[in-house]
Amino acid sequence: MIKLAIRLGTLVTFLAALIAASSVTPAGAAGGGGGGGGGGGNDPYGSSYPPPPPDTKTTHTTRAIPKANKKKPANQSLFDDPAFARGYREAYSTIYDRQDYAAAIDQLKALGHDDFANVANLIGYSYRKLGDYKVSQVWYERALKSDPNHVLTWNYYGLWQIEQGNRDQAEYHLTRIAAICGTDCAEYRSLAEALEKPSGIALAY
């Protein structure tokens, strides 16, 4: 009986020690960070978590050209400049609200972008309104050199052609406008109406 009791006691002690050892081992393993975590309890992801996602911002900037590096069209860039936009609006108002064409020419030239189609066209328009057709033509040609599809220049230059008696040339300008913006746009309609008027009639624009 005594031997049996000793054997049972030894077996119970062994089983207790085995259970205790098995409960300690997983805890130690989890703390190691697994999968190369390395930092023990300092690893915020632990062995059972996937690695953190890659830094998408860094990946994007190294693989893609940032939008800021893409060159904007010249027209858009100029009107994005508050000083230019303000000066252009003032000159525009001087022309269409006050009909002070000489002052508008000075304002437009002061912008420092004489080769910009919008600016060159309005300078040409102002000279035409002042009756200086030769200088006006130079500015219209400059505007079209800057932007061959500048529809308002084709319109104003077409009106210039009518006033100079060049109706065939004005018809050509009308076809250019139609190719750019169609026959329903205001520039086409106004030039077409001007061509229907008898020669020598004063034109509104």
Image (cartoon, rainbow, N blue to C red):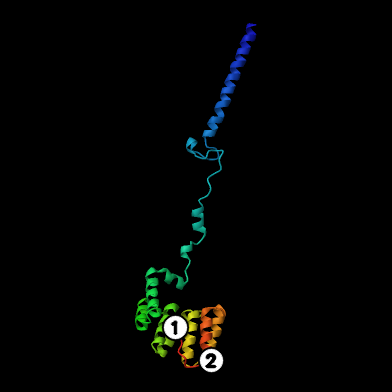
73 or 59: which is nearer to us? Answer: 73
Figure check: 108 above or below 63: below
For label 2, the residue is: 168
Dot 1: within a 10 Å radius of its alpha carbon, few (fewer than 14), some, or many (20 or more) residues?
Answer: many
- Residue 80, image quadrant: bottom left
Looking at the rendered structure, the kind of residue marked 1 is Arg
Could you say whether the residue bearing mark 2 is in a helix, strand or loop? Answer: helix
Q: Residue 48: x, y in percent?
A: 56, 38
Judging by the rendered image, the residue that carries numbered circle 1 is 142
Pick the front one: 89 or 79 = 89
Residue at 46% across / 63% down in the picture?
68
Residue 173 position within the rendered picture, expressed as x and y whole percent measured from the top left? 52, 86
Mark 2, Cα crowd under 10 Å, few <14 / some 14-19 / many 20+, is: few
Q: State which tag comes first along the sequence, 2 or 1.
A: 1
Residue drawn where x is 57% and y is 26% of the image: 23
Which quadrant holds residue 49?
Answer: top right
User: Type of residue at label 2?
Assistant: Asp
Q: Could you tell me which secondary element the residue under label 1 belongs to?
A: helix
